[in-house]
Amino acid sequence: MAESGTLPTGFGELEVLAVGTVLLVEALSGLSLNSLTILCFCKNPELRTPSHLLVLSLALSDCGISLNALMAATSSLLRRWPYGSEGCQAHGFQGFATVLASICSSAAIAWGRYHHYCTRSRLDWNTAVSLVFFVWLSSAFWATLPLLGWGHYDYEPLGTCCTLDYSRGDRNFTSFLFTMAFFNFLLPLFITVTSYRLMEQKLGKTGRPPVNTVLPARTLLLGWGPYALLYLYAAVADVTSISPKLQMVPALIAKAVPTVNAINYALGSERVHRGIWQCLSPQKRERDREQ
């Protein structure tokens, strides 16, 4: 479909509308919840701590993913990509950078929580700021490489959003995929799983761990795993053997990750939940100031 208004191969009118509607719901849900989290951090001094800075980084990256999904939803409902080839490259870069930042921020939070709860020293500002800086610098670096020729951004099967082009399956794509996947998916997943496993082993003896030690790793695996499997299949086989509709499923699953992250890291935290309630309730905020 791309810049034309014709339906893409393998999709009917209702199917394009359904994809656009699902993307719109996911985008608005993730954007509203993560924006509320960011607003809460900015207005509540209690949450301005090194450990919560990592959660703020995750919320920012997830807002970026939701904005990317909102553009894709708008294009799907229009049944065309209205931003041209340069807009496709920019959309692919923005989406890929925020996805990598979200994955790596989740790993940073896992390590930060292990450091906070299982060592005698608290996470300090220098360490937290350095982690956030590294996450975003690394994400921007890897997202820039396809613009420079290692990898390539192109339209997804629906033709209304852009991502890393996996349809070629050549040596250029394969070398980029395996290198990028190791540093930006397998390694963060290993850090996340290991950190929470160690927390369970150490804190489980004295009681229940203060944070959810299962959902973060499952979110990474189930949210981004289908994309990883699709890319892996494209690297070793002919991806055109998979129907275009099925190729869109990983994208729809991944766009739900910002909502799940907001529920887990923000609404699932008592302090953040209390801060959000204070932001939404001016009367309660005034009473807290008087006290």
Image (cartoon, rainbow, N blue to C red):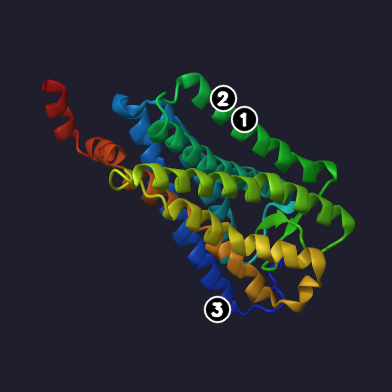
Q: Quadrant of the N terminus?
A: bottom right
Mark 2: secondary structure: helix
Quick one: 47 or 18, which is closer to the camera?
47
Query: Which residue sits at x=70%, y=72%?
Result: 6
* CB within 8 Å, label 2 to label 1: yes
- On the question of residue 52 being in view, the answer is no
Mark 1: secondary structure: helix
Mark 1 and mark 3 lie on one chain; the one further toward the N terminus is 3
Mark 3: secondary structure: helix
Bin the neighbour count of mark 2 within 10 Å (Cα to Cα): few under 14, some 14-19, many 20 and up. Answer: few
Picture disc at residue 14: 3
Picture disc at residue 242: none
As measured in the structure, the alpha-carbon distance from the residue carrying label 3 to the one carrying label 2 is 47 Å
Position of 156 relative to 71 (above/below): below
Query: Which residue sits at x=49%, y=35%?
Result: 57
Bin the neighbour count of mark 3 within 10 Å (Cα to Cα): few under 14, some 14-19, many 20 and up. Answer: few
- Looking at the image, residue 80 sits to the left or right of residue 202; the answer is right
Residue linked to disc 2: 130
Q: Amino acid at mark 2?
A: Ser
Q: Amino acid at mark 3?
A: Leu
Query: Which residue sits at x=29%, y=48%?
Result: 208
As measured in the structure, the alpha-carbon distance from the residue carrying label 2 to the one carrying label 1 is 6 Å
Query: Which residue sits at x=68%, y=52%?
Result: 83
Residue linked to disc 1: 134
Position of 278 relative to 81 (above/below): above
